[in-house]
Each structure stands twice: as C-alpha cells, then as structure tokens.
Image (spheres, rainbow, N blue to C red):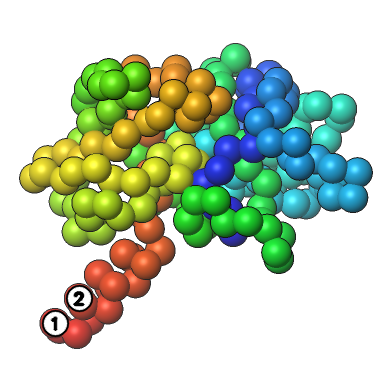
Amino acid sequence: MFSGIISALGNVKNITYNDIYSVDIEITKINLEDFEKSDNLIKIGCSIACSGVCLTLTEKKNNVLTFDISKETMSKTNLSDWKIGSLVNLERALRVGDEIGGHFVTGHVDTVLELQNIIEEDGSKILFIKLNKEISPYIASKGSITIEGVSLTVNDVKNDYFNVNIIPFTWDNTNLRNIKVNDFVNVEIDLLSRYLVNYQKRKDN
C-alpha cells in the first residue's frame, strides 16, 4: 500500500529480457529524506511503486534498484514505453504509523490513458486526460486519482476527458514534467470509488 507521495526519482539504467523483463533504475534524486533511513533500509523483496506500478525489488547495488516485470504488467501499463534514461517516480510501501499525505494507493494500475493537452494557469499546469467508457464511472470531480503514482485531485470531468491540476512543486519533483501530449500515463482509480461503483452495479443486477 502506498499514498501517492513521490519520495524519490530514478532513471532507467538498463532493460533486459530473458523469459522475464528486468529493469535497473538508478536513484538520482531523493525528494523525502526518509526514502532510506538507517532504521528502514531498502531490502530485497520489498515493494516499491515505480511510476504507479507496484514492483518487487529483486536486487540492490548502491543506488541501483533491479525489478523483474511480468508480461502481464508490461501489457497493462506504460512500462513498455520505458527507455534508457526514462524518469521514474519512486515511492516505498507504507509502514504502520506513516503519514498518509495523499490517499490509499495499491500500485495496481487500472489502465493507461492518453494525455490530450497541457495548459499553464497561475503558475500551475493543468493536464487534460482522455477518458474511456470503462474508467469513466469511477472518475468524480474533487475525487482522488493516481497518475504515474502521484496522488492527485480531479478538477473537472466531461464526457470524454477529465483534468487535474499540478502545482509547481509536484511538477518539478516528479516525472510529470517530462510527459508530452499524446503520451500514455498509468492511472489507478480511487479505492473508495472502485468499491462504491461495483457495489452499485451488483445492487442494480
């Protein structure tokens, strides 16, 4: 479980495939000092959200983290678009007692959606993201959503798109600053929305 508060950034250093995909991510910037404390070291087998995708750490050498990625994960996320040098948002799994700065995030990406437009308003960036019929019922104005692992609030929802506001700090300290129009982003819907919509569907049936 995560909270959507990005604690570090990394760059893809290497991608290999031998029955399973393996990716090396080099930590290049620490956003939060507690990303790795002496009393909470990053250990093999721990879960780390990589741009919103929960992955298991299989190897660690200095600042380089290695993860194995299944074909299923590659097909359901934008990880297949990663290249050497791609910027990756990193967040460690929550521990009991940690502050929940965003909202509860599982790291199980629901879909990838296309970025339609970016505009600047009062120093912030507004991202317009294309909606599809499957995800649309779960998106609500002022509700929570996770994009590339970042906990965000939905500004507005229309028939075929929704938008979110990115403040300068978030823009500067996540990989959102590198995305471009027509790129596809990892999206995870809010847990509460998921259960409410599914409950209503079962009730109606």
Lateral position of residue 133 relative to residue 119, left or right: left
Vertical position of residue 120 compared to residue 165: above or below: above
Q: Residue furthest top?
A: 85
Say whether residue 175 is visible.
no
Residue 41 occupies quadrant: top right
Vertical position of residue 8 compared to residue 120: above or below: below
* Residue 54 x, y percent position in the rendering: 58, 48
Residue that carries the numbered disc 1 in the rendered image: 204
Residue drawn 91% across the image and 44% down it: 38
Judge by depth and name the residue closer to the eye, 193 or 62: 193
Vertical position of residue 77 compared to residue 126: above or below: below
Tell me, for residue 135, which label it has, or none.
none
Quadrant placement of the C terminus? bottom left
Q: Amino acid at mark 1?
A: Asp
Q: Amino acid at mark 2?
A: Lys
Q: Secondary structure at mark 1?
A: helix
Quadrant placement of the N terminus? bottom right
Judge by depth and name the residue closer to the eye, 17 or 92: 92
Vertical position of residue 150 compared to residue 190: above or below: above
* Residue 173 x, y percent position in the rendering: 55, 25
Residue drawn 48% across the image and 30% down it: 170
Residue that carries the numbered disc 2 in the rendered image: 201
* Residue 143 x, y percent position in the rendering: 30, 55
Say whether residue 204 is visible.
yes
Lateral position of residue 106 relative to residue 63, left or right: left
**How crowded is the residue under tag 1: few (<14 C-alpha within 10 Å), some, or many (20+)?**
few
